[in-house]
Image: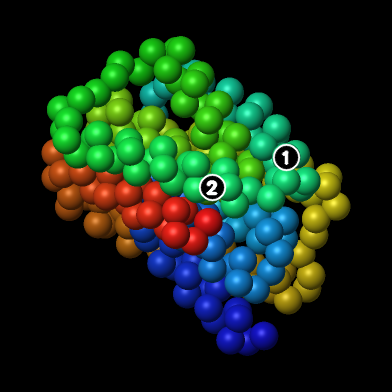
């Protein structure tokens, strides 16, 4: 059990660093690893709580990037859709859907890399579509950050705005899905609760390291960096759903 805790704590730090930089949140890396040890519903609840803490760190470190119109148009549909997705995951195996998501994300990355100057304006309708897909993916897979990032990178946002928006929206989506997981009678045993108490401050340390890295990344290269993160996630979903 001690070895399991050490692995979880280590992946929390690594996920916090890369998750903050990419805007995905920590779920993208943590969910596949924790699934080796625990069933999907327990994994999603555990990771969602740490992900919630990571959202707070993003808001603190990148508070200069607040854009209310973008947050509201993207976030409200995401909150509603995450509740629906969290309801579905308790009854449906998501492996096929994950592969479909992987194909979509990989296609998007190839398009983005071939059209480096392409962007869309952050209109309300676009935000509603992107927020809905993100929220549903977060509820079903626990890894909706890749979908959120796919839409936010299309806006070609400044990196501070991108990361703050990702964190702020994810904060309320996480509250929604955590509530649904718990109401669905999912819980964490005492060992996981102790591990969780260590992982939360470790996620703060990872986010702090990520902040220092992001400050040094030139804005023009930031979008390409995010595209590469999305591409890696897409390949992972296709090979190991």
Q: Position of residue 29 (x, y in %)?
A: 47, 60
Say whether disc 2 or disc 1 marks the residue closer to the N-terminus: 1
- Write down the residue under mark 1: 88
Helix or strand or loop: what does disc 2 sit on?
helix
Helix or strand or loop: what does disc 1 sit on?
helix
Which residue corresponds to the image point at 36% horizontal and 58% vertical from the top-left?
A: 18
Q: Position of residue 179 (x, y in %)?
A: 75, 43
Q: Residues within 10 Å of mark 2 (few under 14, many from 20)?
A: many
Q: Residues within 10 Å of mark 1 (few under 14, many from 20)?
A: some
Q: Residue furthest bottom?
A: 2
Q: Position of residue 227 (x, y in %)?
A: 28, 44
Which residue corresponds to the image point at 49% horizontal and 61% vertical from the top-left?
A: 240
Which residue corresponds to the image point at 41% horizontal and 42% vertical from the top-left?
A: 103
Residue 12 is labelled as none
- Write down the residue under mark 2: 98
Q: Looking at the rendering, which quadrant does residue 46 occupy? A: bottom right
Q: Compared with residue 64, is residue 32 higher up or lower down, i.e. above or below?
A: below
Distance between mark 2 and mark 1 Cα atoms: 14 Å
Q: Compared with residue 176, is residue 90 higher up or lower down, i.e. above or below?
A: below
Q: Position of residue 161 (x, y in %)?
A: 33, 33
Q: Quadrant of the N terminus?
A: bottom right
Q: Select label 2 or label 1 by which is in front.
A: 2
In terms of depth relative to the viewer, which is nearer, 109 or 144? 109
Q: How is the image coloured?
A: rainbow
Residue 175 seen: no
Left/right of residue 20 with respect to residue 52 in the rendered view: left
């Amino acid at each position: 059990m001690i070895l399991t805790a050490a692995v979880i704590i280590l992946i929390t730090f690594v996920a916090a660093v890369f998750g903050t930089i990419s805007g995905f949140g920590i779920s993208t890396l943590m969910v596949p690893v924790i699934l080796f040890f625990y069933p999907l519903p327990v994994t999603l609840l555990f990771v969602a709580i740490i992900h919630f803490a990571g959202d707070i760190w993003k808001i603190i470190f990148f508070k200069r990037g607040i854009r209310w119109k973008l947050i509201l148009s993207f976030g409200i549909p995401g909150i509603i859709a995450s509740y629906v997705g969290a309801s579905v995951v308790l009854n449906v195996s998501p492996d096929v859907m994950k592969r479909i998501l992987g194909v979509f994300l990989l296609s998007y990355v190839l398009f983005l890399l071939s059209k480096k100057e392409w962007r869309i304006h952050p209109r309300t309708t676009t935000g509603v579509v992107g927020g809905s897909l993100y929220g549903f993916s977060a509820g079903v897979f626990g890894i909706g950050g890749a979908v959120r990032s796919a839409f936010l990178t299309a806006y070609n946002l400044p990196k501070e705005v991108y990361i703050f928006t990702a964190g702020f929206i994810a904060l309320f989506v996480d509250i929604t899905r955590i509530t649904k997981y718990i109401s669905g009678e999912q819980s964490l045993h005492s060992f996981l609760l102790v591990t969780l108490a260590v992982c939360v401050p470790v996620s703060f340390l990872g986010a702090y390291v990520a902040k220092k890295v992001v400050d040094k990344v030139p804005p023009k290269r930031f979008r390409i960096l995010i595209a590469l993160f999305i591409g890696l996630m897409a390949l992972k979903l296709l090979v190991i759903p």
